Amino acid sequence: MARAARARHAAGVDARRYTDLRADGWGRGRVEHAVRSGALHRVARGALLSGIGEPTLVDKLQALFLVLPPAAVIGFHTAAELYGFGVLRSRRPHIVVPAGTPVPDIRGVATHQAVVPIGAPVVVAGLPCVPPDRCAIDLARTSRRLDSIAILDAALRSGRCSSQSLAEELWRHDGLRGVRQARELVPLADPRAECRQESQLRLVLIDGLLAVPQVQIWVDDEWGEPRYRLDLGYEELKVAGEYDGSSHLDRDRMRGDRHRHNWLASRGWVMRYFTDVDLYRRPPYIVATMRDAIARASRG
């Protein structure tokens, strides 16, 4: 991306360096007053935005690049959001600089110095980013295990990465912290998982030494037409598990869910539902519950 003293965007937002505002005759007090009144938005020390409305993530990043070193690129959580697999959000923008490059100390910005060569950046919305596979593996090896599988699933679902490209990226990270975790999880990644919790529920079952569950199982009605789709389970045994966020659903949606549950039960399906409490505080309960359901189904 071209480095300029001023950047103008299609939405009518201007990114300006503080030093250039001063050169244009703005006094320090005028700048501070504009920030307090909302006429200017301070993105980072020395980088500001002006314009109508709340600045977008892209606006803020464009302004930030006015004060970053030329070799800096966007990585980790921020690049994942731009690529469309931003499972983990971060309040701070994440920037990567090559090995040997001085790491800028900018308040509110997470700056990472690369150990592995970054390679040619990929431009997304006019911004230079680490390649998508590099971004996914960086996050998969540095995030907690349950989040890492969700990131990898989302990376595949976005179409930015493939199982093969992720596997090829892994060897470049050999010896780095967390690469063993990433190496274990890449073969388990599945783009069919539709949300973070579905991905995490699947991993809980696998880590609990249950068979790898099928994902997104369609159940047909008596005319052979697909009727309901289940998060994950074991089709041959008619056992399925789902993440249940029904505490946030309205009454009509809950009625529909009850009808769905009864319809599946009448056709021999054993359904088990789990909440955020189960997923994040008592995963052994999930494993034990599903193991019991599988054992009962196996006995007929």
Image (cartoon, rainbow, N blue to C red):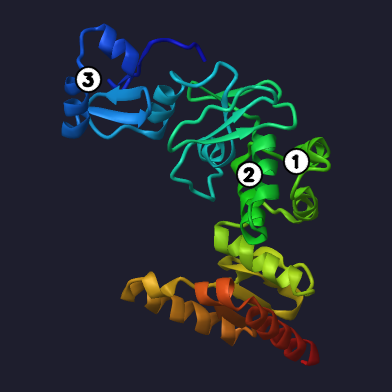
Q: Is residue 198 visible?
A: yes
Element on which disc 1 rests:
helix
- The first of marks 3 and 2 along the sequence is 3
Q: Which is more N-terminal, label 1 or label 3?
A: 3
Q: Secondary structure at mark 2?
A: helix
Q: Are marks 3 and 1 in contact (CB under 8 Å)?
A: no
Quadrant location of residue 79? top right
- Residues at marks 3 and 2 touching, judged by CB atoms closer than 8 Å: no
Q: Position of residue 183 (x, y in %)?
A: 80, 50
Q: Quadrant of residue 218?
A: bottom right
Q: CA distance from mark 3 to mark 1?
A: 49 Å
The residue to which callout 1 is attached is 166
Task: Indicate the amino acid at tag 1.
Answer: Leu
- Circles 2 and 1: CB atoms closer than 8 Å: yes
Q: Secondary structure at mark 3?
A: helix
Amino acid at circle 2: Ala
Label 3 is placed on what type of residue? Arg
Label 1: few (<14), some (14–19) or many (≥20) C-alpha neighbours in 10 Å = many
Mark 3 and mark 2: Cα distance apart in space: 44 Å
Residue 73 horizontal side relative to residue 28, left or right: right
Residue 13: percent from left, percent from top: 29, 22
Image location of residue 74, percent across then percent down: 55, 30
Q: Any mark on residue 155, and which?
A: 2
Q: For mark 2, does the 10 Å Cα neighbourhood hold few (<14), some (14 to 19), or many (20 or more) residues?
A: many
Asked if residue 1 lies left or right of residue 47, the reply is: right
Name the residue beneath numbered marker 3: 28
Q: Is residue 39 visible?
A: no
